[in-house]
Image (cartoon, rainbow, N blue to C red):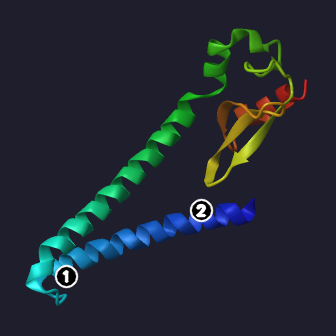
Amino acid sequence: MAQLKSAQAGGQTTQKVLSVLLVVFLLSVLTGVAPVPQVHVVKTVVITVLLLVVFLISIAGEQSHHKRMEKQNLQSYAQSHPGHVSQGRLSCHACNSPHTEARQLAGVDNYKAQMCKNCGNVLFYTPAASRESALAAPLSRT
């Protein structure tokens, strides 16, 4: 698990470094510092701009993923599935199993997923070091 987190963190760092290098390369081509034949300048600029657009889309996707995790919390789960959260008991809405556990998400250090041990369904997300996640863990054992 630690290796996976390390690899994903390394991937994010690599992505950032590549984006900076793309910007530097684009600026050097446009200013004439990088010797690119005149025929290839337009192609180089188009390819570089397309790669930057892909990078910006990936950043936007990552931010929307974090917003979704913020909204899909214990309160929203209780509102959507009131019969599965009551009197200190928590159960899966898909298979009715009372066996759940909080799992650290790969590549996401600040959230944990409360998941069903039986079917693997994600019930909701909690901040990794919050009181809510500490309260959700005892609920999962009942």
**Could you say which quadrant of the image residue 125 lies in?**
top right
Are the residues tagged 1 and 2 within 8 Å (C-beta)? no
| Amino acid at circle 2 | Gln
Residue 70 in the figure: left or right of residue 89: left
Q: Residue at x 41, y 53 (%)?
A: 58
Residue 52: x %, y % from top left:
30, 62
**What is the distance, in whole Å, between disc 1 and disc 2 at their CAs?**
30 Å
**Could you say which quadrant of the image residue 140 lies in?**
top right
Residue 121: x %, y % from top left:
72, 31
Q: Residue at x 68, y 13 (%)?
A: 81
Task: Look at the image and tell me whether residue 73 can be seen.
Answer: yes
Q: Residue at x 54, y 66 (%)?
A: 11
Q: Residues within 10 Å of mark 1 (few under 14, many from 20)?
A: some
The residue tagged 1 is 28
Determine whether the residue tagged by mark 1 lies in a helix, strand or loop. helix
The residue tagged 2 is 8
Task: Look at the image and tell me whether residue 130 can be seen.
Answer: no
Quadrant of the image containing the N terminus: bottom right
Q: Residue at x 78, y 36 (%)?
A: 134
| Amino acid at circle 1 | Ser
Q: Residue furthest right?
A: 142
**Could you say which quadrant of the image residue 37 lies in?**
bottom left
